Image (spheres, rainbow, N blue to C red):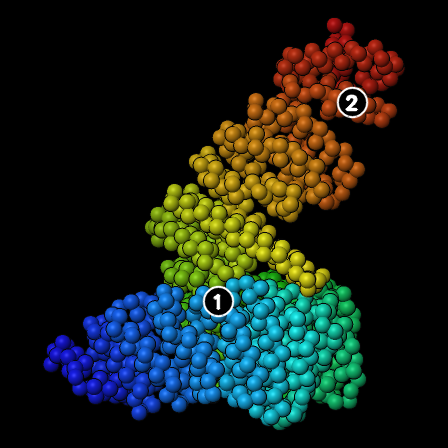
Amino acid sequence: MDPEQQMAAVLGSRPGAFATLISYLMSSDNKKRKKAESLFSLCRVHNPDVVALRLTHLLHSSLPQLRTMAAVLLRSHLISHGGGCDAGLSRLNAITKASIKSLLLAAVQREESKFLTKQLCDVVAEVAAALLPENEWPEFLPFMFQAVTSGSPHLQESSLLVFSRLSQCTRDPLLPHLANLHSVFLNSLSHPSSSPDVRIAALGASINLVRCLPSAADRDKFADLLPAMMLTLTEFLNSGNEAAAQEALKLLIELAGAEPKFLRRQLPHLVGSMLLIAEADALDESTRHLAIEFMITLAEARDGAPGMMRKLPQFIGRLFAVLMKMLLDIDDESTWHAAEEEDEDAWETDNYNFGQECLDRLSIAIGGTTLVPVAFQLFPVYLASPDWQKHHAALITLALIAEGCSKVLIKNLEQVVTMALNSFQHPHPRVRWAAINAIRQLSTDLGPDLQVQYHQRVLPTLASAMDDFQNPRVQNKKQIVQGAALIALASLADSSREQFQNYYDAVMPCLKTILLNATDKSNRMLLAKSMECISLVGMVVGKDKFRDDAKQVMEVLMSLQGSQIEIDDPIASYMLQAWTRLCQCLGQDFLPCMNIVMPPLLQSAQLEPDVTITSDSEYMDNSNEDRVEIANFGAKRIRIRTSVLEEKATACSMLCCYADELKENFYPWIDQVAPTLVPLLKFYFDEEVRRAAVSAMPELLRSAKLAVEKGLAQGRDESYVKQLFDYIVPALVEALHKEPEIEICSSMLDSLNQCMQLSGHLLDKGQIRSIVDEIKHLITASTIRKRERAERMKAEDFDAEEGEFLKEENEQEEEVFDQVSDCLGTMIKTFKTYFVPFLDELSVYLKPMWGRDKTPKERRIAICIFDDVAEQCQESALKYYDTYLPFLIEACNDGDAGVRRAAVYGIGVCAEFGGLVFRPFVGEALYRLNNVIRNADAFSSNTVLAYDAAISALGKICLFHRDSIDAAQVWSDKELLGPNNQYLPKIISVFAEVLCAGKGLATEQTVSRMIKLLKQLQQTMPPPFLASLLSSLPPQQQLALQSAMSS
């Protein structure tokens, strides 16, 4: 049969034919299933009404699998690809719609399967979301309100599930019914006869409605539901129904993340209850974890409730104690002592891992000012215990909180370092491992302070931890400690730089011994970490010191690279990184190795991410998989295997390093690397991949340009550079527009600026336009973000710690402005007057940055942009003087030295190029410059650059506007001659040199003024004093002066 006949048969009068087609869609026979899929797609396109009706009728089938498939297909059929269902429903005629509405409500009433009920309620809610705004389903809400108040638990739950999903799809049709919904939800949550399923559904519906409401006032109407929500949770726990309790906790976590302020009035009660759950050892581990997750989520919700959690009495102390106690959930199992290095975390329990994760998150969210005092109260208690587990837990906790509490821990370095170093001698190897791990982490998070102040104590202690390295029969339980020592040593070397030179000769022989002897499989990770440590040490000490050892190390790496390395062998990743560091150390001497290094590196950079995307309602089970993260984006849930991302990010970063180090000699690989990295500018699964790709863009362009200039590009000319430039720059601008992270925006602007500095003359008008438009977008977006932060400062929970967080965010924002300024400066210098029309457009965005309400850095950036315009565009910039010069002159006396320096530099530029337009400003400019020069603090390290710029500007005014100067404004006789006329000999010497040179150094008018001044001096100075001045000059100059004074 042809397709039309097949459709007629399936959609004809025999209903069983359509059911058979749907069953074939679930077939395990690929051929049968694909044929059914093709036929079903044709039916959908050509007969949407019939398909919709047949699917809806199948919701009443006696076969559960058919009902399930029908619900999935109906949802897809009625929902448009844009995410709503209006476009899908709009294809159907009124009769079909009426039938579907009726059949859907009937199906809701009769469905008994819990899973199918949820699927069906989602379909009903999404159809309603499309029809209610136009009042196309007037009977829907009355039916739902009747069902939710009926005596049937099944109908109550179903209607609440519909309300829950409806709130996620649309809100306006629900707003007139808020009072009814409040009453219904409160009754469902608190009525003694409500079943657990009904209460969970009511909790979900309440939370989703609160989340969708447009205003805080509307949300506050539901705040009195919180006690009923917590009562629901408490009763589940008291009755031993932990499964229901966990469902309730998951919903409350969603609320905490989305609307933390909604919880404020009940916060002490809510958090107190969660702490009791977290502290209850009798409860299931998962229940306790969810209670902790609720509290951590609230602590992290800084955008919504800054400082709210820090103000709760005893909250931090109790939660911190619970988390540290979780780290005790380890035993001295043989698996740890016998573990191969790559399996060193095999002994960690879920409880232990969750405690680690939460300590890290809590420290970042709460900050050191609040957290460190709590930690320092618990550490001595744990360290004084005879149990090695407590000693271990204290060290692990110290390492975990170091990043979030770094500013406060740096002030307590002695206590922190001593705590870690004292533990190197602990009898238990796992404590020693934890101590080394702590030093490694502290070296990263508290550097360089730790390295500068404590390297003399730390390095010898680390070296002593490796005293078994030269023994080839090291016991297994020492391998992990030694591996940790290698990591810590590498981290310390990387941070301490020049201070490590003195330890090289003692450390390198030990490291090479490991590299040469750790050859069997059980020592694989030890070998990998020795590579890491050797390459880092070599990079730190430099080529001259490392050269002799480098040859031997590279021979080992080449041998390993040539051997068969298994896919999951950890040595592969370490080897790629070691090669890169060797390249950074050896520079061009590394070139012979590139053909060995590049193929596996490109392969890693081109890895496709292991990503699964589902709707937010679909469950993802990753309980049995390591290194997997799940993230929610809108209505989609994304599951990502992080191990692949880490390898990809590392490889991309290394490609950038090679291009940077080898310059033009990287040219042979550009044609492979550019198509690999440019698309990764928009690789939103991983920030580090994007960072590496961004950093590589100017390096690739520089390599290509140098290769062409030096004749290494095999006959290619500048057109090749232009082609690469046209590939990179538009991609950078497009990625910049979509980039969600402020820090990466800044990096993108920096890369864009470097590309323009390298080959800015290659920009065409369209590219300039896109860059200017993107700068407008960035300034607008930044202004909005800063306004939002200002609102956060007004929150009642705002505190000093939150102020620090906001300060850091604003500093990131200012860095974006700095990079914008650099980009504009480069385009102004490159295109000069051609760029002026674009500046006219940008002025409305830049002018507000001059305001006194802006930060000093913003004002400085705005002034620098104008300085560039005045200097590079010269006559074309004169039209801006009347607008900007008054700001510039006022800024000369700004309280910030950086602003003053930029302003007085700009005065000098305007004096040089402003001509008649600058003349009316001369007097005020001199007055302001005088203030800068005479400032009592003018020669301090912070202000001397402003002083120098002011002197330069003053000189330019004297040079270009001498006729407009009132000399009294610039100097007085006393200032000119100095105390006790000490400057007079120098002045006489200058006059003599000018007079001897004739017309070579001064105009006739200036010479006449000099002679007049000399005669005045002759009349006022004692003859012996004047004679002594003349005697110090060369004879020719003496004669010239005497002749001038006697004429």
Residue positioned 65% across, 31% down in the render = 953
In the rendered image, the residue lying farthest to the top is 1047
Count neighbours of disc 2 (C-alpha within 10 A) and say few if under 14, some if 14 to 19, many if 20 or more. Answer: few
- Image spot of residue 907 (x, y percent): 62, 32
Q: Is residue 52 above or below residue 676?
A: below
Q: Could you tell whether 663 is left or right of 1016 in the image?
A: left
Which mark is in front, 1 or 2?
1
The earlier-in-sequence mark between 1 and 2 is 1
Q: Could you tell whether 95 is left or right of 897 in the image?
A: left
Count neighbours of disc 1 (C-alpha within 10 A) and say few if under 14, some if 14 to 19, many if 20 or more. Answer: few
Read off the residue under disc 2: 972
Q: Could you tell whether 657 is left or right of 424 in the image?
A: left
- Image spot of residue 8 (x, y percent): 15, 79
In the rendered image, the residue lying farthest to the left is 1
Q: Quadrant of residue 261?
A: bottom right
Q: Is residue 491 above or below residue 482?
A: above
Read off the residue under disc 1: 175
Q: Is residue 516 visible?
A: no
Question: 974 or 582: nearer the eye?
Answer: 974
Q: How many numbered circles are shown?
A: 2
Question: 552 or 263: nearer the eye?
Answer: 263
Q: Quadrant of the C terminus?
A: top right
For the residue labelled by badge 1, is the local secondary structure a helix, a strand or a loop?
A: helix
Residue type, label 2? Ser
- Image spot of residue 1017 (x, y percent): 81, 14
